[in-house]
Structure formats: C-alpha cells, structure tokens
Amino acid sequence: MLSVEGETETESDGAIFNEMMMQPQRLDLSDEASTIFSQQHVRKRMNDLFNNMTVSEISGSLGDLGTFIPLYVALCRQGSLYPAAALFFAGFSNVLTGIVWDLPMPVQPMKAIAAVAVVEGLPQEQVTTAGVWMALFLLLLGFTNAIEIIHRLVPKPVVWGMQLGVGANLAIKGLVMVSQLTWFEKIDCIVLAMTCALMCAILLAESVEATPSNHPVGVYMFLLGSILAVVRLLSESNDAPSSALSQTSIVEWTLRDVTWNDWKVGLLQGALPQLPLSTLNSVISVCCLADSLFPDRRSAEYNVLSRGQVCVSVGLMNLFVLLGAMPNCHGAGGLAGQYKFGARHGSSVVFLGSCKVLLAVLFGKYILTFLEHIPSAILGVMLVLSGQELASTGLRSLFVPLSRDGGPSSMGSASRLSMEIALITAIVIIGLKKTHVGALVGILLDVVQRFRQTRVQSVISSSGSAPVYYDPVQASNGGTQ
C-alpha cells in the first residue's frame, strides 16, 4: 500500500500484515473493562461529565439530528421500527458511549439498511434480522481483531477520500431537502433555509479553529425547529395515512414473528450491503477522524479510540435490536457534525441520550408526530454544515507535511499520489452514492500505483542508478522524479 508516512512504514507493512495473519490477535477487554468500571474511574468520569456540561456541549449534541431525524421518522412511519423503543435505545447507547469515551461519539441509524428498508418497504422483522446479522459480524471482527487486518488493507488516502466523499454527499442531501421546498407558501420553505444558513454562517464565523463557537448554534437551530414544529402542529391538519407500529412501550421482543425468510432477506438485502460501509465509515474512518479532531487526546486514559473497541461497541449496540432498537452505528459524519456545533467531550452525547430516553419514556406516543413536523429547511441546513465539516477534515488531512522520504522537503503540499487516490475515491462515492464502492476503487488504484512504482524501482536498481520515486503525473509529461 502507498504510505504517506515514509518509506520505512511502507516496507514494514507486509511484515506486519503477515504477522497478523499468522498470529491472529484477540481483543482483550478484561483489563479495559476493569479500568472502566472501577470505582475510581466511575467517580472521575461523573465529575468530568458534570464539569464539561456547557452550553457549547449541548449545542454540539444536536449537530447530528439532521441525519438522525429523517431516517428515524421515515422508518417509523412505514412500520419498520417501534418508535418509542428505537428512540429509547438510541439514547441509551448515546449515554453509554459518552461515559466510556470522553468524546462526542455519535449514534446514528445504519444508512444502507435504512435506505434499503425505506426503498423496499422492509417490515420490522427484516430490519431486526439485518441488525442481528450486523451485530454478529462486527463482534467477530472486533474480538478477533480482524478489523486491524482490514485497516492495514485500506490506505490512508482512501480514508481521507471517504471523508471527503461522504461529507459532500451529506451536504448534497441537505441541499436536496431544501430544494424540494417551496419559496414562500408554507412555514417550511426555502426562505427559512436561507435565513438559517445566513444565521449559522455569521455565528460560526466568530469561532476560531479547534475552539467551540461562543454561540450555541445547534441549540438555536433546534429551538427554532421545535417552535415551528409546534406552530405547524397547531395550524396544519395531519390527515396523511401512516402505517407506524402502534407500540408505546420502550422494550419490545422483536423476534416474536420472525421467519427463516426474514433472516435470509435481512442478511442479503440489509447486512451484506451495510457491512463494508460500517467497517470503513463507522470504524476505520471515525477513528481516523477522531485522531484528526482531537490529536492531544491520543495518550489520554480513556479518550483513545481503538478500532477493535469501536467495532465491538457497534456490535453490542446492535444486539439491542432484539428489544426494539434500530440498527445503529458510529459515523464519521455524525462526529463531524457534533464537533462543528461545539461538542468536544462525552458530556454532549450523554445529554443528547438522556433527552432521547426521557422523550421515549414520557412522550413515546407523540414523539414521532412532533419530529416529523420539524421543518426540513432547518434539518437540511444542519446536514450541509455537518457535511462541510467532514469534507473539510478530509481535505485538511491531505494538506499536511508529507515527504516521500519521511523528511520535511514537501512541507505544505500533498503527495500527488495520495491526492489522486483520495480524489478518485471521493468522486466515485459522490457519483454512485456508495461508500464501499468508492473505497474499493481507491484500494485498487493504490495497488496499481504500487505495482507501477515497484516496476520502475526494480528497473532503476538493476541499472545501478540512484533510487528515485515514481510519479505518474510527471511520467505522463515525459520523465520521472
């Protein structure tokens, strides 16, 4: 694989990979669990959560609602989810992840499963089996540490291209939501979206890089959306038919009516399309993004994210589908959105999760009706901002001091090969709307470039010349560098 950290790492990749293949590692959670649940650790985490519960954290906690609400509402309205149970366990997962990791780790619906369920009209039983399959696959990858093998196979430029492509798709989705509205006729209109976008641009412009904004933009947007949702509920008749499941309890045994065909459909139409997306975006990419956004926390006691831990976390979350939860994951887009609106600690998602749990327990019967009346204009603007933050992170990762020999000679400029791989990965993701296909194209391109570079190196070495590095861009202009 093409290494962006110098020749030494490139040459050692094969040895490391072979060692991992010959001696599969297992994720030992015993020491981590004893540390996490020790009395001293729990007391310290509770103090940290309380001390970090600021207005900026509350604002940041709302940064992922632009993704969560549309998918949650769509699945509930067609009867693919139990509204109260799905919201309750999403909140419960938020609280757990916020306590374990002092990071704004998001909990969001699995997009591939949600998309197939909406398009194909999958019933609740098949959505449940898809979630169970995902739980089994991810727990296997996490506990055997096979996720590290996948990480070794995915070059860093591909991860950066995924961030750029997924971020662009989030922004495009937000723009499409706004473009489908009218200009003036209703409360939910394009003018409202333009007003909210202008307000966010002004307020967010006052923040400095890597510092939460002085203005809790997420809080402002959600409060405005809630007020307008109440106004719409009072002024509009809701005669549209709904096939939502009439369940108000927060726990529901979902395997009661499952058939063998449901298991087959859940595997083939739900889990298999979702698995590449989850391993790449919900595990590998989100860990890379966390390192980029929080570089000073890599050596902290409980802020460091390992891919094995995240993989196991997603697997455990999806076991809750047996009790009525929706298939959930940790997504890079959600982390970028919450960071954009001010979240820097686990306090943000603990607050968000607590609100979800309370809403599910107290207002489970009415929450779906309320959420679907939050204006799409506001959700669309929040999606655009979330996508912009994720795409910007991918671009910033490309423009770091890189050198083919590990030195500072190319300070401030991106490696041409890395740029090429990242951009092609992003273009495929944007064009096809399929993250795993874009990642596969990027990996294949990396293999081709490495093969061409190896051939050039072998020819030059056999001729006795000094070693040089192959650059296809310069080669196409008539030479090598």
Image: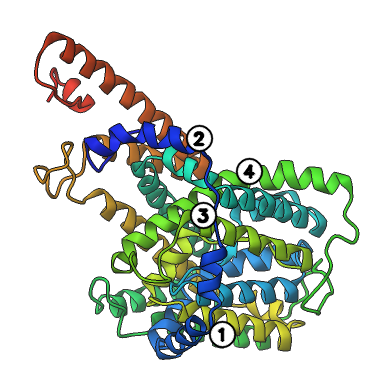
**Residue located at (63% from left, 76% from top):** 92
Camera-side mark, 1 or 4 = 4
Camera-side mark, 1 or 3 = 3
**Which circle marks residue 226 in the picture?**
1
The image quadrant of residue 91 is bottom right
- Find the distance from the CA under tag 2 to the CA under tag 1: 52 Å
For badge 4, the amino acid type reads Pro
Q: Nearer the viewer, residue 453 or 85?
A: 453
Camera-side mark, 4 or 2 = 2
- Which residue is the site of mark 2? 21
Say which element carries label 1: helix
- Find the distance from the CA under tag 3 to the CA under tag 4: 21 Å
Identify the image quadrant of the N terminus. top left
- Find the distance from the CA under tag 1 to the CA under tag 3: 38 Å
1 and 3 marks in contact (CB < 8 Å): no
Mark 1 or mark 4, earlier in chain: 1
3 and 4 marks in contact (CB < 8 Å): no
Mark 1 or mark 3, earlier in chain: 1
